[in-house]
Amino acid sequence: MNYKLEFTRSASKQFLKMGKSLRDRAQIALEKLTDPVLFHSLNIKKLRAPKEGYRLRVGDYRILFIKEQNLITIHDVGHRKDVYK
């Protein structure tokens, strides 16, 4: 069973602002993220306080998300220098 992917409104806007080639790479990574078998093959790390959840690395960009049961909620997308602030 695959995970359901959901974006917050702000994360969706941030995702659409990315360049096309980077957005395509991120889209492929997100498709792998929804597959429980491929989930562990991605560059994912658990975040430490004060942030919660996980981060997915796509080049110099990070996709921050929370994983619950069968739902993955993307709550932040941005360049690595800005996304953790």
Image (cartoon, grey):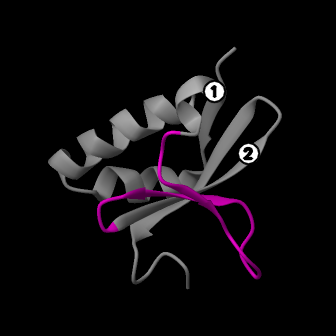
* Residue span colored magenta: 41-60
- Magenta segment's dominant SS is loop
Residue that label 1 marks: 36
Secondary structure at badge 1 equals: helix
The label number, if any, that marks residue 64 in the structure image? none
Viewer-side residue, 6 vs 64:
64
Q: Residue furthest top?
A: 1
Q: Residue at x 83, y 34 (%)?
A: 69
Amino acid, disc 1: Pro
In the rendered image, residue 52 lying in the magenta stretch gets the answer yes
Q: Position of residue 5 (x, y in %)?
A: 60, 33
Say which quarter of the image contains residue 44: bottom right
Please tell me which of labels 1 and 2 falls first in the chain. Answer: 1
Q: Position of residue 75 (x, y in %)?
A: 61, 57
Residue 54 in the image: above or below residue 25: below
Q: Residue furthest right?
A: 69
Rendered residue at 55%/85% (across/down): 85
Q: Image height check: is 32 above or below 45?
A: above
For residue 36, side relative to residue 48 (left or right): left
Residue annotated with mark 2: 67
Amino acid type at circle 2 is Lys
Mark 1 vs mark 2, CA separation in Å: 12 Å
- Does residue 48 sit above or below 26 in this rendering? below
Q: Residue furthest front?
A: 41
Image point 35% across, 34% down: which residue?
28
Secondary structure, mark 2, is strand
Q: Is residue 3 left or right of residue 20?
A: right
Callout 1 crowding tier (Cα within 10 Å): few <14, some 14–19, many ≥20:
few
